[in-house]
Amino acid sequence: MSNIILQVNGLSKSYKDVNALSDLNLQVKQGTVFGLLGPNGSGKTTTLGILLGVIRQKSGNYSWFENGDKTENRKNIGSLLETPNFYPYLSAVRNLKIVAKIKNIEAPTPQIEEVLKEVNLFDRKDSKFKTFSLGMKQRLAIASALLGDPDVLVLDEPTNGLDPQGIAEIRELILKISKNNKTIIIASHILDEIEKVCTDVAILKFGKLIKQGTIEEIIGTENYIIVASTDMSKLTQLIDENAEMGVFKSSEKEIILKVSKETTPESLNQFFFDKGIVLSQLKVHTQSLETQFLEIVK
Amino acid sequence: MIHLLKIEYSKLRHYSTFWVMLIIYAVMVPLAIFGFAQLERPPLLNGSDKLHFPHTWNFVTYVASIFNMLLGILVVLIVTNDFNFRTFKQNIIDGLSRGQVITAKFLIVFVLALVVALYTILMALFFGFLYSDEIVSVFENFYFVGIYFIQTLGYFTLAFLLAILLKKPALSIVIYAILFVFKFIFYFVLGAIGSQFIPMNIFADLTPFPILQEQIAMLEGPQAEGFALIISQPIRTAVAIGYIIIFIILSRVILKKRDL
């Protein structure tokens, strides 16, 4: 099998007069954790809806496993789209048994128990879905996506409604699964989530692809460093004189500098010290994807 | 086919509303048959004579058809549930095609209609043997059961189409019930002949009021003109089957084209 898991060509969709998606082209390779990023209403869920056969595209096409848009493909894709969708009057196990039947999984009980343990729902396996909290519903949806050990996972806002511990657990689960050469596609607007697990990122805005690349390419060649001094005017002056440093954001209290990857906090500290300024604050700005993202979608 | 049916059945197996409504139906039908049988007003046959073979087939299917509304509502629920819980969407995401999803749903409705027809056969045999003094021509007029099955399927596919169109349970049930109960309104709108061709009336007239047709046939002169045309049973059955096919095709087309 070739290593292209998903190929999307010129996908478009409009609702009445709103263009939800225009001419989207994507390629996802096997083994990547692919993040689909974008603000609310940017077309993430529309894209996944089309790829999973529930929304009709206006034009364009897509191909899973180089096998077109056949129904059978979806049996090898575990998906969580928008909300956890289950029969409220059935227990967790009975709901998963229906999914197993659809996916043609023979003798599913051991597998069902295994995925329920994976998401910490085993103790509640015989409780009805309607008695579950939002976080438990979300975890059941993830368990359902894992059923049948599919080669691809499609997760739309997977940590929605989970508590911090749950978020960390899901993140570890995703990282664990991705090690087995599985492909994972995650749509999210929580940048932290994407940055911690994804290898590749595509950024959408108003239904258009703004940028696509590996996470290193997106985060870019720049570092962001926060500096401050008791003499802010002299600090500002020095920065203005130096062509290599750009001001990303500045306030009265601190300045966020955009510097090349080679510039370390150490070298920066040395530079200012030599010019007679003692820094009162020196910190690497960690949320670089967020910074990039906000700049890209501006 | 069997696979799809199994998937649908596992949705219903632990759905209490489904079983409660079936039990209500199963209890109401014999009670109503027994109750109607006590009526002594012409043009009905006297008392329990209505339940003698072969009259029993017409009578039992007529009474049972009144309760088809209940089962029609059940069909609406079975279909709208999957919109409500977004499980139509999830079933497709998990690996069914749109065609399979609707076929599965239609199959379970078809089986339900079969079960109802079988139950009606049992009821007719039970009351027939109970009330007939001499057991003769038991299976004369048995064709009423076949017609009754088509009628049930007609009501069910109409409920099915409404549920697919409207997606919301309450709205679909209200419209279905209005069509069922107030179908006579079409008489005033479309006249005596035109109104007979409305799906609801076509289906309802498949199991006519017992003896009424014979009574009308016996009318002569000016009295008979009000009933100038009553569609014959074979034509009515054919039209009913036509409607059923149209409803199924429409439901399929709608679900295949729609974003879920």
Image (cartoon, coloured by chain):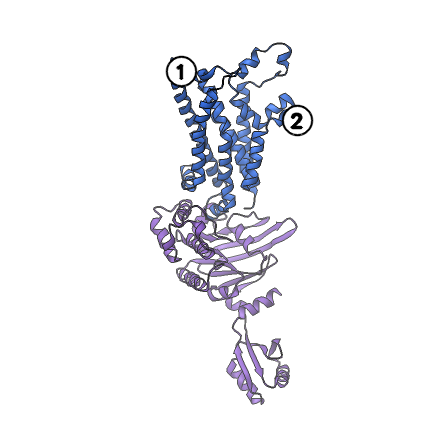
Chain colours: A purple, B blue
Outermost residue, top side:
B221
Relative height, residue B146 to residue A204 (above, below)? above
| Nearest the eye: A251 or A188 | A251
Q: Mark 1: which amino acid?
A: Ser
Q: Position of residue B66 (x, y in %)?
A: 51, 27
Q: Amino acid at mark 2?
A: Val
> Considering only order in the chain, which callout, 2 or 1, is on the residue closer to the N terminus?
1
Q: Do tags 1 and 2 sit on the same chain?
A: yes
Chain letter, disc 1 residue: B
Name the foreground residue: B65 vs B100: B65
**In this figure, which residue is indicated by the disc labeled 1?**
B132
Q: In whole angstroms, how far apart are the C-alphas of marks 1 and 2?
A: 43 Å
Query: Where does the image place residue B59, in percent across and percent down from the top left?
Result: 47, 20
The location of residue A144, given as percent across then percent down, is 42, 52
Task: Quickly name the residue at label 2.
Answer: B189
Relative to A222, say whether A205 is above or below: above
B229 vs A61: above or below: above
